[in-house]
Image (spheres, rainbow, N blue to C red):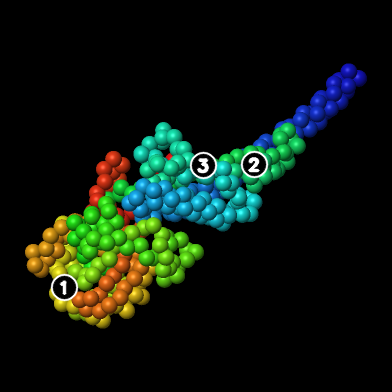
Amino acid sequence: MRMTHRNRLRRHGSILVLGCLMLVVAFILVAFVLNLGYILLVKEELQKAADSAALAGASQILVAQPTSSTLANSRACSDINLAISEAKKFCLKNSARVANLQLLDSDIVVGFLNNPANPESQLTPWTSGQPYPNVVKVVVRRDNTANTPLPLILSSFLGMSTWNGQATATACASRRFNVTGFNSSTVNAPLLPVTISATDWNNFINTGKSPDNRIYDDFSAENPLSSQTAAPDNVSSESDDIPEFEVNGPDWICIGADSSDTNTLRNWIDNGASSADLASFGPQGMQLATSSPGIPGSKSTLTSNLQAAIGQSRVIPIHTSCDGKNYQLAGFAGVVIVDASGTGSKLKIRFQPATIRTPTATISGESWSGTNSFISTKSPLALVQ
């Protein structure tokens, strides 16, 4: 009987020890699960910050580039600085369990990739003589380098007090994305009722010369994609090494139903093409190879409308031929209006090539090896790696 009593006491003591051990294991498991969830949340927040910063940076290298290689190198350096600044600004708007994430200059690479869609492509910083930069890559950290390591919960049970992590994003600003037309059911398309001949536009893109064989560079237009400077304050009277296309006596065309009414033209300049306007060309809207009616006669009262649109991103249809009434469209040019003066047949409009991003555009797909000189409208930004 005495022996049995002792065994029972021993069994009670063993269960108590086992219970304490299980409690320790439970605490470790709880700490592990909590920290794992915490780390996954921070990794997701870091990725969002990286995506935002890369896209913001890439938006600054979509501006039109000069035709001269010397000026292109100078402009590329300027745009790279803008890309770095914009990426850092947008990173600061994000958090990963720490407010205002800092993005280091050394963690931003602006360079050129012939095929950004290839995940095996290695990006190196842009250098003079390379093609114009088209890609921005960023690394956002929470470690001893930037933003401090992440403190862990119940860290004493795990033998580690902090976690170090990072997220990477690469955004592309392609210049080879073919815009085939505009078709909208909800948002007006930013089309102007003015057309330019493909011959004149190609000559301008290749030489910087307007139809009068002169090179104009009297205005500077900041990228209208940035929210820092809104139109018309994004246009100033100074050179920026980007030639301007001058139209002297524009060719007016319908971007909706056939009409020569001045008020209709005024509405197209002010507000763009509505879904009803685009539907007048057919179910696909205004597309390449569309035949668009010309509007004869001088429009002497539209100068003020064009002046009110200075600094805004717009699209001009490009035509290859005209049979006396209808213009055959071959493409679309993204522009910013930088000046408008004169009236009637002496009306002069200055355009600077620019980036256009609009959900109304229809596209033919990405072509990394080919170009289409009729189309200067740029693609929407994309995260490629």
Dot 1 alpha-carbon crowd within 10 angstroms: few under 14, some 14 to 19, many 20 or more: many
Q: Nearer the viewer, mark 2 or mark 3?
A: 2
Task: Residue 19: tell me if it is visible.
Answer: no
The answer to whether residue 346 is left or right of residue 385 is: left
Dot 2 alpha-carbon crowd within 10 angstroms: few under 14, some 14 to 19, many 20 or more: few
| Measured Cα–Cα span from mark 2 to mark 1 | 62 Å
Q: Residue at x 29, y 56 (%)?
A: 208
Q: Nearer the viewer, mark 2 or mark 1?
A: 1
Query: Could you say which quadrant of the image residue 152 lies in?
Result: top right
Q: Nearer the viewer, mark 1 or mark 3?
A: 1
Q: Disc 2 residue type? A: Thr
The residue that label 2 is drawn on is 145
The answer to whether residue 334 is left or right of residue 322 is: right
| Measured Cα–Cα span from mark 1 to mark 3 | 52 Å
Mark sitting earlier along the chain (1/3): 3
The residue that label 1 is drawn on is 295
Residue 229, percent from left and from top: 47, 66
Secondary structure category for the residue under label 3: strand
Mark sitting earlier along the chain (2/1): 2
Q: Disc 1 residue type? A: Ile
- The front one of 183 and 104 is 104
Q: Residue at x 26, y 43 (%)?
A: 370
> Mark 2 touching mark 1, by CB under 8 A?
no
Q: Disc 3 residue type? A: Thr
> Mark 1 touching mark 3, by CB under 8 A?
no
Dot 3 alpha-carbon crowd within 10 angstroms: few under 14, some 14 to 19, many 20 or more: some
| Measured Cα–Cα span from mark 2 to mark 3 | 15 Å
* Quadrant (top left/top right/bottom left/bottom right) for the C terminus: top left
The residue that label 3 is drawn on is 168
Secondary structure category for the residue under label 1: strand
Residue 84, numbered label: none
Query: Could you say which quadrant of the image residue 111 lies in?
Result: top left
